[in-house]
Amino acid sequence: MSKILISGCGITFSGERPTWSKVLRIAGYDITDLSGPAISNQLILNQLLQELHCNKYDHVVCQLTSFGKLDVQLNDHNAWLKDNDSLRNFSYKGFWPSSHSTEQKVKQDFQKYLYSPKLEEQDTILKLLLLQRLCKESNTRLHIIQGYDLAWTDPLIDKLDFDKSFNIYGWYKDSEHYASHDHSGKNTVPSKDFQIKLAKFIAEKYLKDVKTKLERFDG
């Protein structure tokens, strides 16, 4: 059985909500899931790169999230920021995935004075290039999927082999499934029916064996 390593944001994270990664695991796929709720591309890519230096996989699925997110390493001096956030009041592996939240002044100041979009894009592309090289050297099949529409400006993006015109959330919003989307708590995780559709798409396009494992989700 193929060993599959995945990472992404809440679109992929198999936590409270049903996601495509949970569907594939239920169907019997051997998955190591490093995705997390609301995490940034920095943490998504760091976890994949670190894991690939420790273990061998047949497939890597990297689900990119939107730009502008921020993961904050928690300590005794900043934990109160997480605890007092009305929406992003949870932690993940010692980090606060504060995402795009700007309800607190410290986050407002960061977005206004300190956030550097160009550096974030460069950091994302360079880590993706390293991920692509590591996968090539280890004969691992890499599949990069945009969770949201990303406005790439750096020409280095052309050195990465993935479909830049496709993003999961855009497909979701254009589908019939978006009509039943759960908007509570500003949720952006696609619905269960769409996640099943997405799991079949990923299995068929990248893993090449959709019919053998996912038939239980038909109907």
Image (cartoon, rainbow, N blue to C red):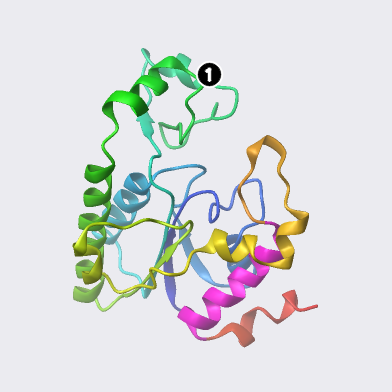
User: Is residue 207 one of those drawn in magenta?
Assistant: yes
The furthest residue to the right: 219
* Quadrant for the C terminus in the image: bottom right
194 on left or right of 59 = right
Image position, residue 7 (x, y; %): 43, 56
User: Where 73 sits versus 215, above or below?
Assistant: above
Task: Please state which of residues 193 and 100 is positioned toward the viewer in this rendering.
Answer: 100
Image position, residue 5 (x, y; %): 41, 64
51 on left or right of 176 = left
User: Is residue 8 one of those drawn in magenta?
Assistant: no
Q: Residue at x 67, y 68 (%)?
A: 196
124 on left or right of 102 = left
Q: Residue at x 26, y 37 (%)?
A: 116
Please tell me how many numbered marks the rendered image carries: 1
Q: Quadrant of residue 174?
A: bottom right
Residue at the spot of label 1: 83
Q: Residue at x 56, y 59 (%)?
A: 169
Q: Quadrant of residue 158?
A: bottom left
Image position, residue 93 (x, y; %): 42, 37
Q: Secondary structure at mark 1?
A: helix
* Magenta span dominant secondary structure: helix
User: Where 64 sits versus 40, above or below?
Assistant: below
Task: Please state which of residues 18 and 101 is positioned toward the viewer in this rendering.
Answer: 101
Tell me which amino acid carries mark 1.
Answer: Asp
Tell me which segment is drawn in magenta. Answer: 191-208
Image position, residue 68 (x, y; %): 38, 40
Task: Please state which of residues 154 and 94 is positioned toward the viewer in this rendering.
Answer: 154
Q: Residue at x 73, y 47 (%)?
A: 182
Q: Quadrant of residue 111?
A: top left
**Label 1 crowding class (10 Å Cα cut-off): few <14, some 14-19, many 20+?**
some
User: Where 133 sits versus 88, above or below?
Assistant: below
